[in-house]
Every structure is written in structure tokens, then in C-alpha cells.
Image (spheres, grey):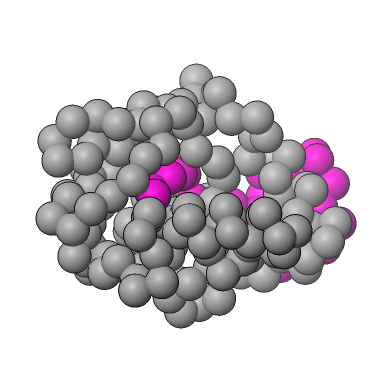
Amino acid sequence: MKPPSALLVKNKPMYIPDFTNNLHYEAEIVLKVCKNGKYVQPEFAKKYYKEIAFGIDFTARDLQDQCKAKGHPWEIAKAFDNSAALSEFISLEKVNKEEGIKFQMKKNGEVVQDGNTKDLIFDFDFLITYVSKFFKLQMGDLIYTGTPAGVGPVQIGDKLAGFIEGEKLMDCEIR
């Protein structure tokens, strides 16, 4: 879970925080919850999202490792200010969800992550159902869904670009 201050929107640059020397990117599809609900049953899950975005879940990997080694929770390594880059949302009507939604991240022009939602361990409907058992879903909530292989570090000067179905939705410069 991330606080509102974690959002990084409108293609703003990501400034590497002083507390990490090993910042990593993780490309993800993001669901936007469109109605309130609790204990959503699987047959109704589709009614709880209509839009998706491209997101980057930034992780301070060195801080995460330190927390894990001590048996501490590691939210501070994933939920810090600007750790959740987010593109504009697009309607699911623009993509063919049944065949899987292709998404890609490029770092300095090279593809580093190439995913498809059909390969997610947990599909959108399962995530809605599962999360709603523990937290009341509220309109506007965001669910980052998981990342494909290729997670890696960033350095000052790197340029990240996010794509859904070949359409560029995000640019994020690392500063």
C-alpha cells in the first residue's frame, strides 16, 4: 500500500532519494477502481474497473534488503514519495483484455520489460475479489498488478518509457 504522496504523474521526473543507492524499476499495469465495494464476488469483479494505466513501482532495493534481513516490514522501500509513477488512464474498451494486454518498458530506448496480462499470476478479477476481502474498495483506488521479468536498476540520466499495446503512455527521466 502506498500513500497519495507516492504518486508520480504527468511524466514528471523521478529524483533518486538520498536514502538509496540501488533504485529499481518494476513496470506494471494499474487498475483504477470505478465503484465502491467490499467482499466482491468473482462474478461481479469485472464491474469494478473500466480503465487501466501504465505504472512503475519504484523500489529502494538496498533499503528493502536491510528491512528483510531484520525481519521488518519494507513499506518504506516501496511507498516513499514519488515511488508510484503513473500514466494517464485508458479505457479497457481500447484493448482486447481477453487475449491479454501487452505492455512494455524501455530504458534508454532498449526494451527491458515485455509483458502480457495473460501471464499475470493473478488476473484482474481475482485481484479485485481478493483485495476486497481485506479492504473496502473505493472509487479511484489504484491496484498495481504485478511485473514481468526484467526488473532492474536506474541511474541518474536514464529515460524510462512505458507502453500499452504499443502506445507510448509514459516518459520518466531519472534525476
Point 67% across, 70% down: residue = 138
In the image, residue 36 sits, relative to residue 133, either above or below, namely below
- Give the x, y percent position of residue 110: 18, 31
Q: Is residue 5 left or right of residue 2?
A: left
Q: Nearer the viewer, residue 120 or 22?
A: 22
- Give the x, y percent position of residue 58: 42, 56
Q: Can residue 140 be seen in this view?
A: no
Q: In which quarter of the image is residue 3?
A: bottom right
Q: Is residue 90 visible?
A: yes
In the image, residue 48 sits, relative to residue 161, either above or below, namely below
Q: Give the range drawn in magenta.
A: 24-49
Point 73% across, 39% down: residue = 126
> Which part of the image, by quadrant, shows the C terminus?
bottom left
Q: How many labels sit on residues?
A: 0
Q: Is residue 56 left or right of residue 142?
A: left
Give the residue furthest to the bottom: 5
- Give the x, y percent position of residue 140: 55, 69
Point 69% across, 40% down: residue = 125
Point 24% across, 29% down: residue = 111
In the image, residue 24 sits, relative to residue 140, either above or below, namely above
Q: Is residue 104 left or right of residue 37?
A: left
Question: Is 70 one of the magenta-colored residues?
Answer: no
Q: Which of 120 and 45 is in front in this view?
A: 120
Q: Is residue 119 left or right of residue 36?
A: left
Q: Nearer the viewer, residue 78 or 95?
A: 78
In the image, residue 143 sits, relative to residue 16, either above or below, namely above
Q: Nearer the viewer, residue 117 or 111?
A: 111
- Give the x, y percent position of residue 172: 22, 57
> Which part of the image, by quadrant, shows the N terminus?
bottom right
Question: Is 35 one of the magenta-colored residues?
Answer: yes
